[in-house]
Every structure is written in structure tokens, then in C-alpha cells.
Amino acid sequence: MAATFGAIAGRGSSLRAETKPSARAFMLAALASVGGVPLALSAFLPVSAALPAGAALAGAGALFATAAVFARDARQNEKKAVSERAVDEVSPYNFFAGLVTIHDGRGFVTAVHGRDMKEILSWMRDPMGRGFLDQIHVSDRLSFIQTIDRIRQGAPHATIDIRMERPRLRPDAEQFVHMRVNLTAVRNDDGSLTGVVAQSQDISAEAQLKSEAARKTEEAETANDAKTRFLAAVSHELRTPLNAILGFSDILSGEYFGKLENDRQREYVALINQSGSHLLSVVNTMLDVSKIEAGRYELLSEPFVVSDIVRACEQMLGLQAREKGVKLTSRVQRDLGEAVADQRALQQVLINLVGNAIKFTDAGGLITIDAERRDKDLVLTVSDTGIGIPAAKLDAIGQPFMQVHNQYTRKYEGTGLGLSLVKGLVALHGGSFAIRSNPGEGTVITVRVPADGSGIALAVEPHADLAETVEFPPRLPARDAGAAAPAVLTLPLSGKHNEDGGHDRTRAKTA
């Protein structure tokens, strides 16, 4: 045995130069005991007592040889670790926010970087290899793999929101973290994919805000739906007794069952009939508004002569205008002819617009109805010289039960449903609603609808499912500044006037 260790010690330099793992194992086994005495024990004994005669020098030589091999390996490992740390520290990915993972074509992670790497890895399990993929929520995992596949097939970059599993440290802690992953392809000069750089950032706060907004939106829609059902139910309940009141007041006014005793009785009966008619009009408007909100208002598209609805509006409201001392006139473009739309709905639009204009125009004022065709649209404009609307209030016009309240409008009656109904009916036709106004000067309201009825199908299609509620007031498509009607139309107009006389251009004050 001594001769053997002497030989090993004598050849120590050559062994150190060519020691391999197998040689190292042999050497350690040989050094496990010398002369039957464990080296671990021999370290605490005198050399003469610990080792047999002649073995001390051999054991010392073997120990020196082994120590030299270990020292060399340690120096090499340290140099390698320092080199790897240096490469990792200078990587530009370490300056990227969040966690930066390098993926191969299969989606497996080959390297990890990122400015927030330590923070994210404090709760994330080891992402190397399949680790990152396995921690993605099972519902999002396929989408992530498909996104990697799109990049492999040539897409330069992609973005996907995923949920990453997080150990639940507390019972109330969220099990998943919402992450937004921006993926960018890394390719060779020949275009072949060498890897995918994925930058993952925590967007849990943003996801929480979206969830809260969705919850509040759902609550608002539920409340709005309940309000719509309430309006419809109340309106139906009111119509039955109102019809009876109007019917009996008509009988009393006609004195079918005997004459009224005096003028005061006749006056009271007339007031009952007038008030009942007004209330019935409000109820009908509420019904129409609730139908529009619920998506249950059905339009009947048919060709009709546009001048007919203008004339009907003048006939219905002409007396009311005269009683207030307001001039009502109309101008219809020559050869305007027919349009395709719901005639009853557009007539109701005009009646509501003109009725509002009469209500807010004082004696001596002027109201004008203009009808013309611009491009493929039927354009109806109602202008007045009334009290006008402040610019700050224009955005609120058309909301249900909304009126502009100030010292000038308190004396005017109304529910604020008229313009709301107008906007709803116009939206169902696929049209637009524009308003211009200045306080003390007047208001111009312009309605545009496709003259061929093509907008009705587009407007009705989203509401085919009656279970869905219609957003109200409807959002109308944006129009350019030229969509609003000018103060004086320049197209050739016919000279159609009502019995109040011709149109006085000099008195038309518009905003």
C-alpha cells in the first residue's frame, strides 16, 4: 500500500494535469483509508501513530495532489460564475420593467431577466423550461401558445393578457395575478426565429378597475331596465282612465244628455278635456320612450310624400301658434318628392320639434320648417327665434326628463321627453340630430335620415333580440360641422306657406 501511494505521490503533477472525474473518484477512494486508518481520524493523531510505517509520506503526497485538483476546479468554476454574472448584469433586458423571459419556439423559457425580476419571482415558481407555461391559468394557456405560434409563423410582435397562478399566502389573497405580456420575435438575418422575448407586467390594478366598472355598468343597466318597465306599466295604467275622462268630457261638451246650465260649466268641461288631452299626450310619449329604450319600437318603412308630414304638422299646431302670437311657416324643396321611412315617426318628430319651438318662442316670434334633400339624406330643420339654450346645456338636451332650467324657462311647461323621443326615433332611422342655439336669439335643430330607408335596417339590427336594452339616449354618429343646417337655406325652395302668410326672412333670427 505504501508503495502504491508513493507512486501516486511521485506522479502527482501528471495526475493533476490529467485528472478526470473517474480518476478523482479513484483517488478519493484510495485516500479514504491509509493502512486501515481513516484519514478523517488520522488528522487528529500524530503522524507516527496515525499512519503505518512508511505510509506518512505517501499519504501526505496524495493529499497535496487532491488539494491541488480541487483548487484548480474551484478557480475555474469561480471564473465561469463571474463571467456569467457579468453577462447577466450587462444584459439590456435587465433594464426592462417587469419580468423578461426568453422563450424558444415551443414557448419554453431559456433565460430570465427584468428590472422587477426579484419581486415577481418572490411569488412565482421557477419559470425556466415549462415552468412559466405551467403557471398560466388553464383558460389562458391555449391563447398564449397560439400567440407564440403566430410569432413563429412570422408576426413581429404580439400582446396578450393572461392570469398567472400565485400561491395563496392568505385565505383572502387572489389566486391569480393579471399580467400583460408583450412578445417580440428575435430572428437571424435569414429570418429564422431564434427566440421570443416576453415582457410581463402586473396589471392587476387595471383589471380590478375594469371589473369594478363592468359591475357598476351592469347595476346601472339593471336600474335603467327597471325604470323602463315601470314607465311602460304606469303609462298603460294611466291610458285606460284617461280615455274614459276624455270620452265623458266630449259627451258633456256636446251636451248629448242635456244642456249645461251656464258658461262656467262649459269652461270647466273644456278644461277637463284640454288637461286630459295633454296628459294623454305625455303618457303616449312616455310609452314611446320606454319602447325605444327596450328596443321594442317597431318602425314601418314605406314611401310617403315628405310635404304631407310638413302640412300635417302645420295643420295640427297652427292654431296653437296663432293663439300665442307666433308665426309658423314652412319651406319645402321643389321636387322633393317621396322618401322611405316611418311616416308616423317622422311626423311625430316634426310635431315635437315644432311644439317645443312654439313653447319657447314668445309672441311676435317666427318658427320655420324646412324640408330638403342633401346627397342621399332627407333633412328636416326647425328654426325659431325663441329664448335659446346656453352652450353649457346643449349636451344635456335630449336626455329623458331633462329641461334647461333658468329664470327664463321656469314659466314653460313640459316633461323634457319631447327631444328625448325625437333623438330616439331619429336614431332608429339611422340618422343624426344636430342643434345650434344662442340664448336670446333662437335655436336651429336639424334632423337627417337616409332618404331611401337604408338606415332603418342598420339601426334595428342590433336590437333584434328584445332581451337586450337600447342605450338611451342613443349615441348618434358624429357629423362634421357642415351637418347643421344654415340659417337660410340656399337650395331652391317652393313657396308653400300656411295661412299665416309668407316667410319673413328678415325676422328669422337663428344661432
Image (cartoon, rainbow, N blue to C red):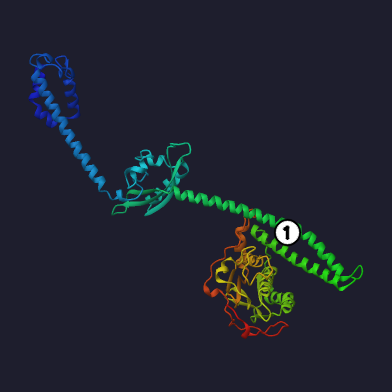
Q: Quadrant of residue 294?
A: bottom right
Q: Quadrant of residue 58?
A: top left
Quarter of the rendering occupied by the N terminus: top left
Q: List x then y, in percent, for residue 12.
A: 10, 27
Name above or below for residue 32 compared with residue 501: above
Query: Horizontal placement of 439 versus 127: left or right?
Result: right
Q: Is residue 275 above or below residue 158?
A: below
Q: Position of residue 92 (x, y in %)?
A: 28, 51
The outermost residue toward the front is 407
Residue 506 in the image, given as x and y percentages of width and height: 62, 86
Residue name at image x 68 percent, y 54 percent: 229
Q: What SS does tag 1 mark?
A: helix
Whether residue 130 is visible here, answered yes or no, is no
Relative to 503, say whether 158 is above or below: above
Residue at point 19%, 39% (across, down) = 79
Residue 92 in sight here: yes
User: Pointer 1: what residue?
Assistant: 235
Amino acid type of disc 1? Ser
Q: Nearer the viewer, residue 406 or 100?
A: 406
